[in-house]
Image: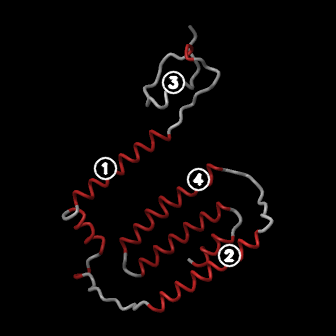
């Protein structure tokens, strides 16, 4: 995990850094598995590797900005400030690690049952209504994002009189359907 994290920072190619970030997320899921937190490990892989990292890769590949790196004239000031902030954060985290009592006080799961089974039982008994409402809300958000983000192919050469059919769309974005096939001869 540490090697992949160092690679994320040191690679100059941003695509390689994004792939190594996925390796960091998978390594963190492995640590969760070693701590017997199988549900958190599965959620780590599904959410961070399967969603966040893929979203980062899509954003990088869609932008596709090809500019050479040009350093600022006073870039040494930023490097010094970054180093000071990093050393300060390392000091705070080290103090927290040393001052925290790390005794495990919770009782282990009875009967060798997995935490996924217990969470599933709670989801489908005690928290069924909020679980279903959250899934419906996420579905509505996904459909709304698809509607807002869709793009139609509209060539500038065609006039509305040449088009035979219109598309029913939102009033904010009136568009007309353009067939990509060749038009029939009259």
Tell which circle, 1 or 3, labels the residue nearer the N-terminal end. Answer: 1
Q: Is residue 25 left or right of residue 114?
A: right
Where residue 108 sits in the image (x, y, percent)?
A: 28, 84
State whether residue 157 is above or below residue 79. above
Where residue 95 sits in the image (x, y, percent)?
A: 51, 89
Where residue 154 sits in the image (x, y, percent)?
A: 58, 28
Quarter location, residue 56: bottom right
Tell which circle, 3 or 2, labels the residue nearer the N-terminal end. Answer: 2
Q: Quadrant of the C terminus?
A: top right
Neighbour class for label 1 at 10 Å: few (<14), some, many (≥20)? Answer: few
Whole-number angstrom distance, CA of label 4 to CA of label 2: 28 Å
| Secondary structure category for the residue under label 2 | helix
Whole-number angstrom distance, CA of label 4 to CA of label 1: 26 Å
Residue on which the image places disc 3: 176
State whether residue 2 is above or below residue 50. below
Residue on which the image places disc 4: 59
Q: Nearer the viewer, residue 36 or 169?
A: 169
Q: Please tell me which residue is depicted at 23% across the width and 82% down the height of the picture.
A: 110
- The answer to whether the residues at label 4 and label 1 have Cβ atoms under 8 Å apart is no
Tell which circle, 4 or 3, labels the residue nearer the N-terminal end. Answer: 4
Tell which circle, 4 or 1, labels the residue nearer the N-terminal end. Answer: 4
Residue on which the image places disc 2: 81
Tell which circle, 4 or 2, labels the residue nearer the N-terminal end. Answer: 4
Neighbour class for label 2 at 10 Å: few (<14), some, many (≥20)? Answer: few
| Secondary structure category for the residue under label 1 | helix
Q: Nearer the viewer, residue 174 or 107?
A: 174
Where residue 182 sits in the image (x, y, percent)?
A: 59, 20
Residue 21's tag is none
Whole-number angstrom distance, CA of label 1 to CA of label 3: 31 Å
Question: Which mark is nearer the camera, 2 or 1?
Answer: 2
| Secondary structure category for the residue under label 4 | helix
């Amino acid at each position: 995990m540490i090697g992949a994290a160092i690679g994320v920072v040191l690679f100059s190619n941003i695509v390689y850094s994004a792939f190594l970030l996925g390796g960091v997320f998978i390594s963190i899921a492995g640590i969760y598995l070693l701590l017997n937190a199988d549900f958190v490990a599965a959620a780590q892989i599904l959410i961070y590797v399967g969603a966040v990292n893929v979203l980062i890769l899509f954003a990088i590949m869609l932008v596709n900005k090809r500019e050479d790196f040009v350093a600022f004239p006073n870039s040494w000031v930023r490097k010094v400030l970054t180093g000071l902030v990093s050393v300060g954060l390392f000091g705070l985290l080290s103090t927290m690690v040393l001052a925290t009592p790390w005794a495990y006080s919770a009782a282990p799961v009875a009967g060798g049952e997995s935490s996924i089974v217990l969470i599933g039982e709670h989801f489908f008994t005690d928290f069924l209504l909020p679980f279903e409402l959250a899934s419906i809300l996420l579905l509505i958000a996904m459909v709304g994002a698809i509607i807002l983000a869709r793009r139609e192919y509209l060539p500038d050469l065609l006039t509305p009189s040449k088009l035979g059919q219109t598309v029913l769309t939102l009033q904010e974005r009136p568009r007309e359907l353009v067939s990509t096939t060749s038009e029939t001869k009259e």
